[in-house]
Structures are given as structure tokens and as C-alpha cells.
Image (cartoon, grey):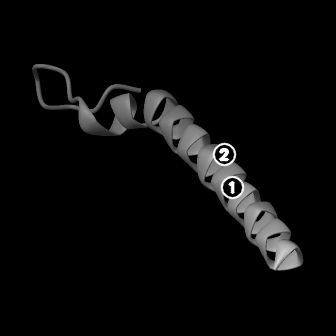
Amino acid sequence: MTLWRLAAVTLWRLAAVTLWRLAAVTLWWLAAVAPFRISPDPKGHHNQ
């Protein structure tokens, strides 16, 4: 029972770290790339 709990906690931590890194990369990508793709200037052209 203890071994199963240890394995479950280890997998849970690994999954949490993976999701946290994925979220951080996604936020970084949105901050770095999205403004250039989403916001056009008043003339309708994309900023670059």
C-alpha cells in the first residue's frame, strides 16, 4: 500500500511539473508571438 502511494505521488508530481512547464511555455509563446499575429495596426496590416 505504501509503495503504491509513493508511486502515485511521484507520478502526480511529475505530471504537475510537466503541466506547469507547458503552461509557462504557452504563456511565454503568447507573450512573444501572439501580439504580432493578433493585433493589426489601424490600417489593417499586421505589425512586424
10 with respect to 38 (left or right)? right
> x%, y% of residue 11?
75, 67
Q: Nearer the viewer, residue 41 or 6?
A: 6
Secondary structure beneath dot 2 equals helix
Tag of residue 21: 2
Callout 2 crowding tier (Cα within 10 Å): few <14, some 14–19, many ≥20: few
Circle 1 packing at 10 Å, graded few (<14), some (14-19), many (20+), is few
Instruction: Using residue 29 as the reference point, say whether residue 15 is left or right of it.
Output: right
Give the structural element (helix, strand or loop) at label 1.
helix
Q: Residue at x 76, y 59 (%)?
A: 14
Where residue 6 sits: x, y (%)? 84, 67
Quadrant for the N terminus, please: bottom right
Residue under the point 70% across and 49% down: 17
Residue found 21% across the figure and 29% down from its top = 40
In the rendered structure, are the residues bearing label 2 and label 1 in contact, judged by CB atoms less than 8 Å apart?
yes
Task: Give amino acid for label 1.
Answer: Thr
30 relative position to 23: left or right: left
